[in-house]
Image: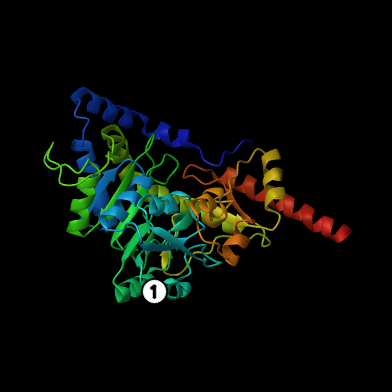
């Protein structure tokens, strides 16, 4: 049996006719510049998240970059975030000339540990970027409380958390601004690159719309310098088709996660969903001190796996070339040596999940036997 980490073809086959029809209509009309598909998807996604506005951009990285600019973050400012994230979170901070400040993570959720936030504040702190990693929201109430007390912005990196909830509210609506990626492997994925900024702040909305389109409004009248970060009309057409299916896909992911939780051996550390969270399982990430051996074993069984992410940003070569400060982040550094992502996509069958669980059990049984023999 061959089970990839992600299987995009199964989902496409179920939506193929509708998606091709929407793409065909977009090409027939040739309104390819911020047209009706972008407008419809922006409106639908804002309603889905519970925000006043959604601004379509070229990628999740673009969303983070423009959100920082729209919040007035620039050279000399500090932005508190985590090192246990995809590189783009910190890359966006560096791109605006600000200084990333890292704090460690909660060992259960792998998200920002709010108890370490206040100690990281300085007179130059201007924003916090909590990352809703793997599809589970960060613990937002203490983050928002501190942000209000210090009068700084909260920019949610929700690039892996479409539809996730914190105390009944969807990610992207909790802070001042939310940032989403529609990279093709995401829970809501384009067939290429795409991203979105969500906010209920009219000034942030205005700034993001200006910045994504060369700072022009109306055409050829430029009030500021911007960039070309517009959401593509064809990608918007695809995402418009997919959005009504998102909640159903999320429930499938959550059911698969429950099956994993029940079927994997107790010696494997499984994701811990907090009582205040609705985890959407963009990734199903386990932990074991035998991560590399287990990964090799599963490969022999035809099971694809991933590591998200094996090297934290404060230990990356780019960070040191950038002149970043040295950090001691013991939880982050311990976790990244043990994490392993198992296959997770809505079309994963019960038979496939059982096969994966049985394969992990075979491995852990072998490890136990080796330990006894030793």
Which quadrant, please, contains the N terminus? top right
| Foreground pick, 61 / 214 | 214
User: Residue 222: percent from the left, percent from the top?
Assistant: 15, 42
| Foreground pick, 370 / 76 | 76
User: Residue 334: percent from the left, percent from the top?
Assistant: 63, 62
> What colouring does the structure picture have?
rainbow
User: Residue 138: percent from the left, percent from the top?
Assistant: 43, 64
User: Residue 22: percent from the left, percent from the top?
Assistant: 27, 30
Residue 91 placement, left or right of 195: right
Q: Indicate the quadrant where residue 195 lies.
A: top left
**Residue positioned most to the right:** 373
Residue 29 placement, left or right of 352: left
Q: Which residue is mark 1?
A: 142
Query: Which residue occupies 55% across, 64% down?
Result: 327
Query: Which residue occupies 35% across, 74% down?
Result: 146
| Foreground pick, 327 / 152 | 327
Mark 1 secondary-structure assignment: helix
Query: Which residue occupies 17% across, 57% down?
Result: 202
Residue 185 placement, left or right of 43: right
Above-or-below relation of 373 to 229:
below
Above-or-below relation of 157 to 80:
above
Above-or-below relation of 340 to 37:
below
Residue 288 placement, left or right of 184: right
Q: Indicate the quadrant where residue 226 lies.
A: top left
Question: Does residue 43 appear in this view?
Answer: no
Residues packed near mark 1 inside 10 Å, few (<14), some (14 to 19) or many (20 plus): some
Question: Does residue 220 appear in this view?
Answer: yes
Which quadrant, please, contains the C terminus? bottom right
């Amino acid at each position: 049996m061959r089970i990839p980490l992600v299987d995009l073809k199964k989902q496409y086959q179920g939506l193929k006719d509708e998606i091709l029809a929407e793409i065909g209509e977009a090409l027939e009309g040739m309104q390819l510049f911020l047209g009706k598909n972008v407008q419809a998807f922006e409106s639908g996604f804002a309603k889905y998240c519970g925000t006043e506005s959604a601004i379509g951009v070229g990628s999740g990285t673009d969303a983070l970059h423009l959100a920082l600019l729209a919040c007035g973050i620039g050279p000399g400012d500090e932005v508190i975030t985590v090192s246990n994230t995809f590189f783009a979170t910190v890359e966006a901070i560096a791109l605006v000339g600000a200084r990333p400040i890292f704090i460690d993570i909660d060992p259960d959720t792998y998200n920002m540990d709010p108890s370490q936030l206040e100690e990281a504040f300085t007179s130059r702190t201007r924003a916090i970027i909590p990352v809703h990693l793997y599809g589970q929201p960060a613990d937002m109430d203490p983050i928002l409380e501190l942000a209000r007390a210090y009068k700084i912005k909260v920019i949610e990196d929700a690039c892996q958390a479409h539809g996730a909830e914190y105390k009944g509210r969807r990610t992207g609506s909790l802070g001042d601004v939310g940032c989403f990626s529609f990279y093709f492997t995401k829970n809501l994925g384009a067939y290429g690159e795409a991203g979105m900024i969500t906010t209920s702040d009219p000034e942030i909305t205005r700034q993001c719309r200006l910045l994504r389109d060369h700072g022009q409004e109306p055409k050829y009248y430029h009030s500021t310098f911007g960039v070309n970060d517009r959401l593509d009309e064809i990608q918007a057409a695809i995402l418009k088709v997919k959005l009504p299916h998102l909640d159903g896909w999320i429930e499938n992911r959550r059911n698969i996660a429950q099956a994993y939780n029940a079927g994997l051996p107790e010696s494997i550390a499984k994701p811990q969903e907090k009582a205040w969270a609705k985890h959407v399982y963009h990734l199903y990430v386990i932990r074991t001190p035998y991560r590399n051996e287990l990964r090799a074993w599963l490969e022999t069984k035809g099971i694809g796996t991933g590591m998200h992410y094996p090297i934290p940003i404060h230990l990356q070569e780019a960070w040191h070339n950038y002149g970043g400060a040295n950090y001691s982040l013991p939880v982050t550094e311990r976790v990244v040596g043990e994490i392993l992502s198992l296959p997770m996509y809505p079309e994963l069958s019960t038979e496939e999940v059982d096969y994966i669980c049985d394969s992990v059990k075979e491995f852990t049984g072998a490890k136990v036997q080796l330990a006894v023999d030793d």
